[in-house]
């Protein structure tokens, strides 16, 4: 340990309560109250889904940019996107233009919803001159296999007669070839990284349509239709690019978006928490940490399967200082032995006892600071 203790604070958001930035500030206040001399590094985190854009904007100290495009059913919408302070990295959050929340006011259209707006946002990011594009999935309203994103980038998806197919999963059922002549000139010159926290393949009983289609309004008949359409799409992508994506782990995320990005753009699919950690500089921060505090609304079995806490624990295990990782959560549902097996030293709930959700939400920041102070005093008390 160094003379001055170093505490890294890297929480996820508490959904429905506070943002990751708010959580980090509250935890940091608790740390400082118990260890005024400590060096505290605040790195709010996200798992690569909705909300990641705001976390990265805060970490980089930049203001999101905006583009008027179309939502998942073709209506005008203003979507935000991001470029890092050094201009090298662009961020596209799918939910901004093509999210389910954005079309919650209309009847869900599982066969017609698309991601073309996200593709237009990606084109704007490329126009900004970036060298790398981070695509944050999560909250998708469509099952279009990423065809809409390609369309937004200038690709034409054609039927057997050479006509462009309509947007959405229904159009995939007619897809026969790709016209890549209009693809954005920089699309294949940059590195694409796609955040996907699921390993579902593109098709089949564990595929995009079967698992995620129903939440987007797909009925049993729609699911079967979309699965066949995605299978056809996979065949088109393989014929046109030589890349097989049907069984690719994670290709079924967000309605199959990774399939198109991997095949046409050479994208790399990776856990979202890892992608965000790299983007905010978390590995370097943890390398000399004495304590790491993280948190999320509910700490459960999913938390140690590629989520933020899991990624942080893995980084800590590789750190020269091997700092203890402590989770502060709204509720703790994972048994202590399973948490320790995943590299989490301890997990604490902010609930002081029997309470209501409204009361817990109201006092979240105060309780976070209290628990952080206790953990800090216990961990660094002998310093």
Image (cartoon, rainbow, N blue to C red):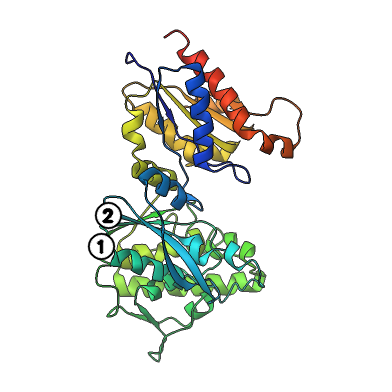
Q: Is residue 114 visible?
A: yes
Q: Residue furthest bottom?
A: 161
Q: Contact, CB < 8 Å: mark 1 with mark 2?
A: yes
Total numbered badges shown on the rendered structure: 2
Q: Report x, y in % for residue 319.
A: 33, 26
How far is mark 1 from mark 2, CA to CA? 7 Å
Residue at x 36%, y 42% (from the top left corner): 280
Residue at x 35%, y 67% (from the top left corner): 124
Q: Is residue 345 visible?
A: no
Using the image, determine if residue 63 lies above or below residue 382: below
In this view of the protein, which residue sits in the foreground, 328 or 202? 328
Q: Quadrant of the N terminus?
A: top left
Q: Report x, y in % for residue 284.
A: 31, 33
Query: In the figure, residue 64 lies in which quadrant?
Result: bottom left
Q: Is residue 129 left or right of residue 311?
A: left
Q: Quadrant of the C terminus?
A: top left
Pointer 1 or 2: first along the chain? 2
Q: Is residue 238 left or right of residue 291?
A: left
| Structural crowding at the residue carrying mark 2, measured as other residues with C-alpha within 10 Å and reported as few (<14), some (14–19) or many (≥20) | few
In this view of the protein, which residue sits in the foreground, 365 or 52? 365
In this view of the protein, which residue sits in the foreground, 202 or 334? 334
Query: In the figure, residue 374 lies in which quadrant?
Result: top right
Q: Report x, y in % for residue 42.
A: 42, 33
Disc number placed over residue 216 in the picture, else none: none
Q: Which residue is mark 2?
A: 87
Task: Check disc 1 and report its element: helix, strand or loop.
Answer: loop
Disc number placed over residue 129 in the picture, else none: 1
């Amino acid at each position: 340990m160094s003379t001055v203790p170093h505490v890294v604070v890297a929480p996820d958001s508490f959904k429905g309560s506070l943002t990751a930035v708010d959580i980090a500030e509250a935890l940091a206040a608790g740390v400082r109250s118990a260890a005024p001399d400590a060096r505290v590094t605040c790195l709010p985190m996200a798992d690569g889904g909705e909300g990641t854009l705001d976390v990265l904007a805060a970490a980089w100290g930049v203001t999101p940019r905006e583009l008027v495009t179309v939502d998942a059913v073709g209506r005008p919408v203003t979507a935000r996107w991001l470029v890092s302070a050094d201009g090298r990295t662009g961020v596209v959050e799918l939910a901004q233009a093509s999210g389910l929340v954005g079309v919650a006011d209309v009847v869900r259209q599982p066969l017609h919803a698309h991601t073309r707006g996200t593709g237009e946002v990606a084109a704007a990011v490329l126009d900004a001159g970036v060298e790398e594009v981070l695509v944050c999935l999560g909250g998708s309203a469509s099952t279009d296999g990423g065809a809409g994103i390609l369309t937004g980038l200038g690709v034409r998806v054609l039927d057997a007669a050479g006509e462009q197919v309509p947007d959405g999963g229904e159009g995939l059922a007619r897809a026969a070839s790709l016209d890549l002549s209009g693809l954005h000139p920089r699309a294949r010159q940059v590195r694409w990284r796609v955040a996907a926290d699921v390993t579902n393949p593109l098709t089949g009983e564990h595929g995009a349509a079967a698992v995620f289609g129903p939440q987007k309004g797909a009925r049993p008949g729609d699911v079967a239709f979309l699965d066949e359409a995605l299978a056809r799409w996979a065949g088109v992508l393989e014929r046109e690019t030589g890349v097989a994506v049907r069984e690719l782990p994670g290709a079924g995320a967000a309605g199959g978006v990774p399939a198109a990005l991997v095949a046409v753009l050479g994208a790399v699919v990776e856990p979202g928490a890892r992608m965000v950690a790299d983007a905010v500089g978390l590995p370097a921060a943890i390398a000399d940490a004495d304590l790491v505090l993280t948190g999320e609304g509910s700490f459960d079995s999913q938390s140690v399967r590629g989520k933020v806490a899991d990624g942080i624990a893995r980084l800590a295990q590789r750190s020269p200082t091997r700092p203890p990782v402590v989770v502060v959560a709204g509720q703790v549902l994972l048994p202590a032995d399973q948490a320790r097996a995943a590299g989490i030293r301890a997990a604490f709930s902010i609930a002081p006892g029997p309470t209501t959700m409204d009361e817990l939400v109201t006092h979240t920041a105060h309780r976070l600071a209290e628990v952080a102070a206790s953990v800090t005093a216990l961990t660094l008390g002998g310093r």
